[in-house]
Amino acid sequence: MTLYDAVGGMPFFERLVTRFYEGVADDPILRPLYPDDLESPTRHLTLFLAQYWGGPTTYDAERGHPRLRMRHAPFDVGPGERDRWLFHMRTAVDATGPPASARRALLDYFETAAEAMRNRD
């Protein structure tokens, strides 16, 4: 069983990402990094995470290979931005209440991914 299946599929990832962007919307450090309309980033992150964790490959079909570092390179992502992103993602994970093993896997991945996106000190 994939993590995608263990957490209930696409509805889980939709809730997770919606909750994440609720935090980003009011964050003075992160909000300037995003477009005015958060609809596209919400869709992209939902599809990416669902695919990464074993769900449908809609992200690849619509956007191609994720190339995360390349897609984030235009944005200044330092320790402050990384830490705020992680704060909102941890909050979203806790709010969605996945099973303990899925929670740990998600948090481990997000910590690694957030650091990988950092492109300045």
Image: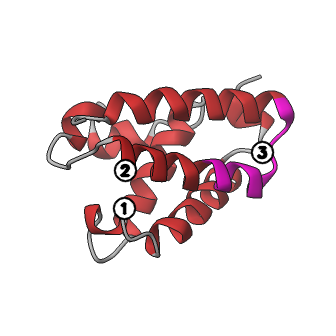
Tell me which amino acid carries mark 2: Glu
Q: Are the residues tagged 2 and 1 within 8 Å (C-beta)?
A: yes
Label 2: how many Cα within 10 Å (few below 14, some 14–19, many 20+): some
Nearer the camera: disc 3 or disc 2: 2
Q: Is mark 3 on a helix, strand or loop?
A: loop
Tell me which amino acid carries mark 1: Leu
Q: In the shown orientation, is residue 14 left or right of residue 38? A: right
Q: Where is residue 39 in the image (x, y as percent from the top left)?
A: 40, 70
Q: Position of residue 45 (x, y in %)?
A: 45, 50
Q: In the shown orientation, is residue 56 left or right of residue 120? A: right
Please determine whether, in this image, residue 44 is positioned above or below residue 101: below
Residue occupying the point 56% across, 60% down = 20
Residue occupying the point 23% across, 34% down = 119
Q: Along the polypeptide, which appears first: circle 3 or circle 2?
A: 3
3D distance between C-alphas at marks 2 and 1: 6 Å
**Tag shown at residue 8:** 3
**Tag shown at residue 119:** none
Magenta extent: 90-100
Residue occupying the point 59% across, 36% down = 55
Q: Are the residues tagged 3 and 2 within 8 Å (C-beta)?
A: no
3D distance between C-alphas at marks 1 and 3: 29 Å
Q: Where is residue 17 in the image (x, y as percent from the top left)?
A: 56, 57
Considering every residue shown, the one lying at the far left of the view is 74
Residue occupying the point 45% across, 61% down = 42
* Residue 67 visible somewhere in the drawing: no
**Tag shown at residue 30:** 1
Magenta highlight on residue 98:
yes
Pointer 2: what residue?
81
Q: Is mark 1 on a helix, strand or loop?
A: loop
Label 3: how many Cα within 10 Å (few below 14, some 14–19, many 20+): few
Q: What element carries label 2?
A: helix
Label 1: how many Cα within 10 Å (few below 14, some 14–19, many 20+): some
